[in-house]
Amino acid sequence: MTEETKYSKRVATNMVIANMIGTGIFTSLGYQVAEGGIPDAFSIVIIWLLGGLIALAGATVYGEVATRINRSGGEYRFLTEIYHPLLGFISGWISMIVGFAAAIASLSLAASEYFAPVLGKDAATFHLFGMELESAKWFATLLIAIVVLVQLGGVKRSGMVQNVMTYVKISLIICFLLLPLIFSGKYEPSGVSFSPSESSLSTIFSSAFAGSLVWVMFAYSGWNASAYIVGNLQDPKRNLPYSLLRGTIVVTVIYLALNMVFMYVATFDELAFQVDLGNVIANKILGSQIALLFSVVFSLALISGINAMFIAGPRVIQEMGKDHQLFKVLGAQNESGAPVNATLLMGVIAVLLVHSLSFGDLIEYIGVTLSIFSLLTVIGLFILRRRDRGKEDPNIVKAKFYPLSPIMFSVFVIWMITYFLMSKPIVIVWFLITIIPAIILYYLSKRNENRNSDNMGTTDKP
């Protein structure tokens, strides 16, 4: 693999930032401040800061795990090497369906929601061949198709698009953060206090706080994005930890600032259950007509997240195709380094999910499911260190603050998962249902490989 078919440090960092800044930050607060959520602004700031610290702890652990194993594929490759190929296969399946395809679908739908005011209320549906179709879902489908075409152009083109779109997104957010200051006399602030209240401490240790943490972790999901392309990354020892840590720190600062702006401008009632928080704030500050410009830019900015997931996701499918003969066709890539079949498959799955998506429940499902496999990867570092004891490899990047970093990550993720086991067990049931097809496909693949091996052995006999 030449340097031209590998991603640079800048692309890897932007990929982490773009993967993280997406649907979560512009939707999560609307569910956190709703009835039964978190009642005060101080506790909300704390939960977003805590989410950043958890992501940083995970990022530094992933840096070591990825450089020890040094192959693309993320959790699929890590759990295969650390535990067992079956667990790795299940993780790859979950990454394909939940971690990337479902996230791409939700990002595409969010981009459609932000663009909807531009089209107007009358454009909510359109007719084709006598059928009434939802404009938002077909707009989302079009976005996915465009990004797939970009990805099929290869590593160089997709990396260039990623850099440009990430800079657009960051520029938009900076402008958005300055709006309340520039137009301070044009709207009435919410009057919220960011100081701790008498109930703040009890709120932080409550079950509602643990439940809201899943929305935060969904928003932070993507902190491990560049670990998926470690095999396609220039100088992974230096560039992988740089991209993971720098990307996560940048996003943590942005998330804290954005949430404080949201709560400063709009009341909890105005924010509750809103999917397009950016539009809510822009409308209040600028008025509906000028806010249309932000609607367009917001929808364009979300495309960087879609593109970033199409960089990372197909690499998981590609690695599965290399390891399992039943999926061999998915392991192929073109001369430009694009995993063509894997990219097309992920696009098809994402489109199917766009047309069958239930947003609120899906976010909780994504957050819990991905956290389980991230937890297994982080715990796996203890196993890898014991296994590799006495072997010094100069290419390995040691996790900072070990063993505190993996312990901290594990404790908070287990706390969150425990909350759902006790209060919303249906989320865990969905998780178990999802992995059943993966187990069946894994053993079908193994049986097919064993049969082919036996046939070859029979053919070779004199």
Image (cartoon, helix red, strand yellow):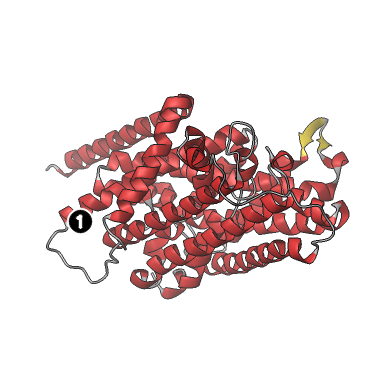
Q: Residues within 10 Å of mark 1 (few under 14, many from 20)?
A: some
Q: Is residue 167 left or right of residue 420?
A: right
| Picture quadrant where residue 170 is located | bottom right
The amino acid pointed to by label 1 is Arg
Q: Tell me the quadrant of the picture where the C terminus can be found.
A: top left
| Residue 60 location (% of width, % of height) | 36, 60
| Residue 375 location (% of width, % of height) | 35, 45
Towards the viewer: 221 or 339: 221
Identity of the residue furthest to the front in this view: 198
For image coordinates 41% across by 28% down, the residue present is 421
| Residue 196 location (% of width, % of height) | 56, 48
Numbered-mark total = 1
Towards the viewer: 123 or 385: 385
For image coordinates 58% across by 60% down, the residue present is 254
Rendered position, 12 above or below 222: below
Residue marked by disc 1? 385
Q: Is residue 88 left or right of residue 208?
A: left
Q: In terms of secondary structure, where does tag 1 sit?
A: helix
Q: Is residue 14 visible?
A: yes
Rendered position, 165 above or below 145: below
Q: Is residue 324 visible?
A: no
For image coordinates 37% across by 63% down, the residue present is 231
For image coordinates 77% across by 35% down, the residue present is 133
| Residue 422 location (% of width, % of height) | 42, 26
Q: Tell me the quadrant of the picture where the N terminus can be found.
A: bottom left
